[in-house]
Image (cartoon, rainbow, N blue to C red):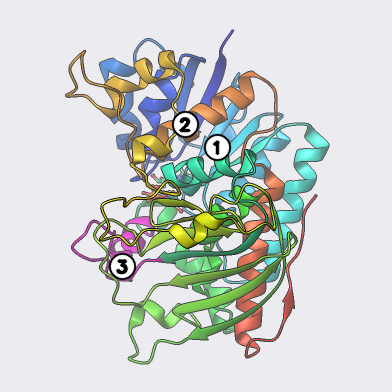
């Protein structure tokens, strides 16, 4: 038997998920919610939705949605709303999926408080929380997670992660953050933004790039399945009175963490930076280095040591890239298709008309959006609910991502002072 799923938030990002959730073979029924009736109408009138969409249960408020006969609700609303909405869903006895981040507010202590409230609610209600972090289902992360599980990195030694997203975007497909903010602060809910933020800003409590750290920290933390213990960080401030940064105390933050597995992790969160990488190889990326294997820029390298601690002669025989023997056995540049873990065939078949509407019967399924992560996120959440198990990105990991950003921000405000990172069990 499949699941009954609700979705709150049919805006720019959420609308990309509706048809995927509807198409999943384990979803029997879907109900949609947005306070903007026109956004609902797009889907209630779409023939593709008809076999599973419960039109009578579509509604315009979360208060109504939580009363419906549903197993789970996916929340893809504005980022300052996520945590209280997720708490309401958990308290109604339903599993919840949240777009990233767990919550975005200027007050770090309040964010930590929300992390604790949600962790407590998951324990108390027995319902699950899953963070919809796209990085976890990028091909690079899936590949590295498999390598980590197989022990092929050896002992981890060092990692880096970065999210380099300039406020103005660029010609290579990055969203312009001024436009994103304009969109999220219009409409019935969006227009409440200024009133909600005023109490913080009037006290001088401001955002930082580390208020939304999930894309940079999640890859290394998830692959290594470890936690950050402490951090020292430095920031850069906007100096040209750009109004976008009026509500940010820093526009870029760079942090060095010590991790529980003994490695160091360097993180960069940048919103004011001249990065123009076409393929995001230098903008939304991580590198992970172990004593035996390492991953960087879609390349897996292995020093071919068979026994830890024993240097093998092959290290002396590494050919030069100009040699005919290049690439040598320990070097492999991976394509996205090689790095991905394939979805089950019946799920690929169900998602294909959504992701690849112009594909022919002969064409393979191609996962789309944010590195092909969207179909994987939907599959993982639906399966976790159907199988009544913890999802791959549970509350304790989602909360830790926020705690990492908060600790880095605090450290940066205190000139790099070493700052502890909170853990969630
Ligand atoms: N890579 C990623 O993981 C990624 C990328 C983009 C956006 N996001 C996240 O997705 C989220 C949504 O972004 P967006 O650009 O779609 O925002 P949006 O403003 O376009 O859409 C939000 C929608 O939620 C609705 N809504 C909010 N609260 C509601 C309520 N209580 N009742 C009814 N409707 C309600 C609004 O009416 C709006 O239509 C953000 O939190 C963002 O952080 C994540």
| Residue at mark 3 | 178
Whether residue 59 is visible here, answered yes or no, is no
Q: In which quarter of the image is the N terminus?
A: top right
224, 347: nearer the viewer = 224
Give the image quarter of residue 178: bottom left
381, 206: nearer the viewer = 381
- At x 70%, y 54%, the residue is 226
Mark 3 residue element: helix
- At x 57%, y 75%, the residue is 255
Q: Does the magenta stretch include residue 177?
A: yes
The spot of residue 322 in percent (x, y) is: 25, 61
User: For the residues marked 2 and 1, what is the alpha-carbon distance in whole angstroms?
Assistant: 35 Å
The spot of residue 190 in percent (x, y) is: 41, 56
**Badge 1 residue CB within 8 Å of ligand 1:** yes
The mark tally for this picture is 3
**Badge 3 residue CB within 8 Å of ligand 1:** no
Give the image quarter of residue 415: bottom right
Q: What segment is highlighted magenta in the picture?
A: 164-185
Q: Which of marks 2 and 3 is in front?
A: 2
Using a 10 Å C-alpha cutoff, classify the residue at mark 1 as few (fewer than 14 neighbours), some (14 to 19) or many (20 or more).
many
- At x 56%, y 12%, the residue is 2
Q: Farthest residue toward the top?
A: 1
| Residue at mark 1 | 62
74, 134: nearer the viewer = 134
**358, above or below 278, in the image:** above
Mark 2 residue element: loop
**265, above or below 138, in the image:** below
**336, above or below 207, in the image:** above
Q: Which of marks 1 and 3 is in front?
A: 3
- Image mark for residue 341: 2
């Amino acid at each position: 038997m499949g699941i009954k799923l609700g979705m709150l938030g049919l805006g720019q990002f959420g609308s990309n998920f509706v048809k995927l959730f509807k198409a999943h073979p384990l979803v029997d029924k879907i109900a949609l919610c947005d306070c903007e009736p026109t956004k609902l109408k797009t889907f209630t009138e779409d023939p593709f939705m008809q076999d599973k969409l419960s039109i009578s249960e579509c509604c315009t408020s979360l208060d109504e949605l939580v009363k419906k006969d549903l197993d789970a609700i996916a929340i893809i609303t504005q980022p300052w709303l996520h945590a209280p909405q997720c708490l309401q869903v958990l308290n109604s006895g339903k599993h919840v999926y949240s777009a990233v981040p767990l919550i975005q507010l200027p007050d770090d202590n309040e964010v930590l408080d929300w992390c604790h409230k949600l962790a407590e609610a998951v324990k108390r209600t027995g319902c699950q929380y899953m963070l919809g972090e796209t990085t976890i289902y990028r091909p690079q992360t899936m590949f590295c997670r498999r390598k980590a599980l197989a022990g092929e990195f050896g002992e981890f030694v060092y990692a880096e992660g970065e999210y380099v997203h300039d406020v103005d975007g660029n010609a290579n497909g990055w969203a312009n953050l001024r436009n994103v903010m304009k969109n999220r602060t219009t409409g019935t809910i969006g227009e409440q933004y200024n009133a909600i933020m005023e109490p913080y800003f009037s006290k001088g409590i401001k955002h930082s790039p580390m208020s939304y750290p999930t894309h940079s920290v999640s890859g290394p933390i998830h692959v290594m399945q470890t936690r950050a213990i402490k951090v020292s960080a430095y920031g850069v401030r906007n100096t040209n009175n750009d109004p976008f940064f009026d509500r940010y105390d820093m526009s870029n933050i760079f942090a060095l963490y010590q991790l529980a597995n003994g490695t160091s992790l360097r993180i960069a969160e940048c919103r004011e930076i001249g990065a123009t990488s076409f393929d995001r190889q230098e903008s939304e990326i991580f590198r992970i280095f172990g004593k035996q294997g390492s991953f960087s820029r879609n390349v897996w390298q292995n020093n071919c040591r068979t026994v830890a601690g024993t240097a093998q002669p092959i290290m002396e025989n590494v050919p030069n890239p100009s040699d005919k023997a290049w690439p040598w056995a320990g070097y492999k540049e991976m394509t996205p298709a090689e790095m991905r873990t394939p979805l089950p065939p019946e799920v690929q078949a169900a998602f294909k008309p959504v992701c690849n509407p112009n594909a022919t019967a002969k064409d393979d399924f191609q996962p789309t959006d944010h590195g092909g992560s969207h179909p994987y996120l939907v599959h993982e959440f639906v399966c976790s609910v159907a199988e009544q198990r913890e999802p791959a990105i549970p509350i304790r990991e989602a909360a830790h991502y926020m705690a990492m950003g908060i600790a880095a921000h605090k450290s940066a405000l205190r000139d790099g002072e070493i700052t502890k990172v909170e853990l969630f069990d």
